[in-house]
Image (spheres, rainbow, N blue to C red):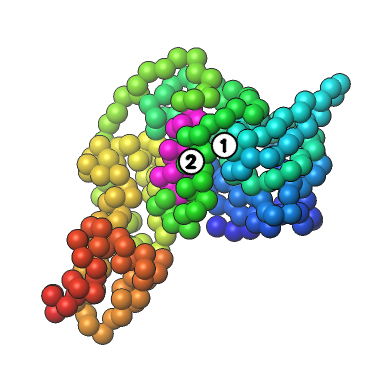
């Protein structure tokens, strides 16, 4: 996670940074998310030059946003309500004037990421996402709002990111044909490799993408094959491994709960306690007292 990137006082989408009270960037399920907004209102005139064939989805988390989009020979005006969205691609110059409230979650999706999400959803023949402006989507709005509140969690970023991607494909996908893609598990070699990598990296963040790269597979194909082979998603297997490691470490009374949490890849003591209690049925402190 990091601050939004770009040069000078203007970000890659043409927004003046000084007008934003919050401006965060992170990645989930291959989607680049940008949280942009603040009490100062909208950033005014934005002008972004064509840069790629990526899709950009923006959803407003508050009402009262107004947007005038300027085309070569005409302009369009839109009033955004809470949970209204727009979808466009970044292969055209974009100029607009933004006024009123401004609290947006922007989702930038590269063609390869969109293809992986479609493969993961079992969809073939996806040509892209249909452009739209001002459509109300309470489902996407709810997912985006939940992600904004919990994006610090790697697990939530991946799961909500995938849910958002699948929803976009199902709702706005331009699909020439649709069929289920044949499934198959991991080879024994890749299954052992993935498990060994997970166990060697438990004390640090582990992404499905990095495991897929080591197995020379796409993220979506790896995730599907891993579950086919193990009966669990990669993140379920990772979490179970972290819990098992923590139970071993908890038997060492010289280690604090914070030490155990960090050694097992949890963000802090509180995160460790929540996950441990959800899996074991009691907090780690209680489990340790009974086990020593």
Residue 197 is situated, as x and y percent measured from the top left of the image, at 33, 56
Instruction: Indicate whether 126 appears above or below 60.
Output: above
Residue at x 53%, y 24% (from the top left corner): 172
Quarter-of-image position of residue 280: bottom left
Could one spot residue 248 in this view of the protein?
Answer: no
Indicate the position of residue 175 as horizontal and vertical percent values. 50, 18
* Residue beneath the point at 33% across and 50% down: 235
Where residue 38 sits, quadrant-wise, is bottom right
Horizontal relation, residue 205 to residue 257: left or right: right
Taking the view exactly as shown, the residue that stands out farthest to the bottom is 254
The chief SS type of the magenta part is helix
Q: Which span is picked out in magenta?
A: 157-169
In the image as oriented, which residue stretches furthest toward the front?
64
Instruction: List x then y, in percent, for residue 41.
Output: 73, 49
In the image, farthest residue toward the top:
177
Q: Tell whether 269 sits left or right of 80.
A: left
The residue that appears at 81% across and 42% down in the rendered structure is 45
Q: Where is residue 271 shown, x and y percent of the image?
A: 36, 64
User: Which of 7 and 166 lies nearest the eye of the viewer?
Assistant: 166
Picture layout, residue 273 above or below residue 171:
below
Do the residues bearing badges 2 and 1 touch, measured as CB atoms within 8 Å? Answer: yes
Q: Secondary structure at mark 1?
A: loop
Q: Nearer the viewer, residue 187 or 139?
A: 139
| Above or below, 72 relative to 250 | above
Q: Is residue 168 magenta?
A: yes
Q: Which disc is residue 83 wearing?
A: 1
**N-terminal label among 2 and 1:** 1
The residue to which callout 2 is attached is 142
Residue located at (13% from left, 75% from top):
290
Q: Check disc 2 and report its element: helix, strand or loop.
A: helix
């Amino acid at each position: 996670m990091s601050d939004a990137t770009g040069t000078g006082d203007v970000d890659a989408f043409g927004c003046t940074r000084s007008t934003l009270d919050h401006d965060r960037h992170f990645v989930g399920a291959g989607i680049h998310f940008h949280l942009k907004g603040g009490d100062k209102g909208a950033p005014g005139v934005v002008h972004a030059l064509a840069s790629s064939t990526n899709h950009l989805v923006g959803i407003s988390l508050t009402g009262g946003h107004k947007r005038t989009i300027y085309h070569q020979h005409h302009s369009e005006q839109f009033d955004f309500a809470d949970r209204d969205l727009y979808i466009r691609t970044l292969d055209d110059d974009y100029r607009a004037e933004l006024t009123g409230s401004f609290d947006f979650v922007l989702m930038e999706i590269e063609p390869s990421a969109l293809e992986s999400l479609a493969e993961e959803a079992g969809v073939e023949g996806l040509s892209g996402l249909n452009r739209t402006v001002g459509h109300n989507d309470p489902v996407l709005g709810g997912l985006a709002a939940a992600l904004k509140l919990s994006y610090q969690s790697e697990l939530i970023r991946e799961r909500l990111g995938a849910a958002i991607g699948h929803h976009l494909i199902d709702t706005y996908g331009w699909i020439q044909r649709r069929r289920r893609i044949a499934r198959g598990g991991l080879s024994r070699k890749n299954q052992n490799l993935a498990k060994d990598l997970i166990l060697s990296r438990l004390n640090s963040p582990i992404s499905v993408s990095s495991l897929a790269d080591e197995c020379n597979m796409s993220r979506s194909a790896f995730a599907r094959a891993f579950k086919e082979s193990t009966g669990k998603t990669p993140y379920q297997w990772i979490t179970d491994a972290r819990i098992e490691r923590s139970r071993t470490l908890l038997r060492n009374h010289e280690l604090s709960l914070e030490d155990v949490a960090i050694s097992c890849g949890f963000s802090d003591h509180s995160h460790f306690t929540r996950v441990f209690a959800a899996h074991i049925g009691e907090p780690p402190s209680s489990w340790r007292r009974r086990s020593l």
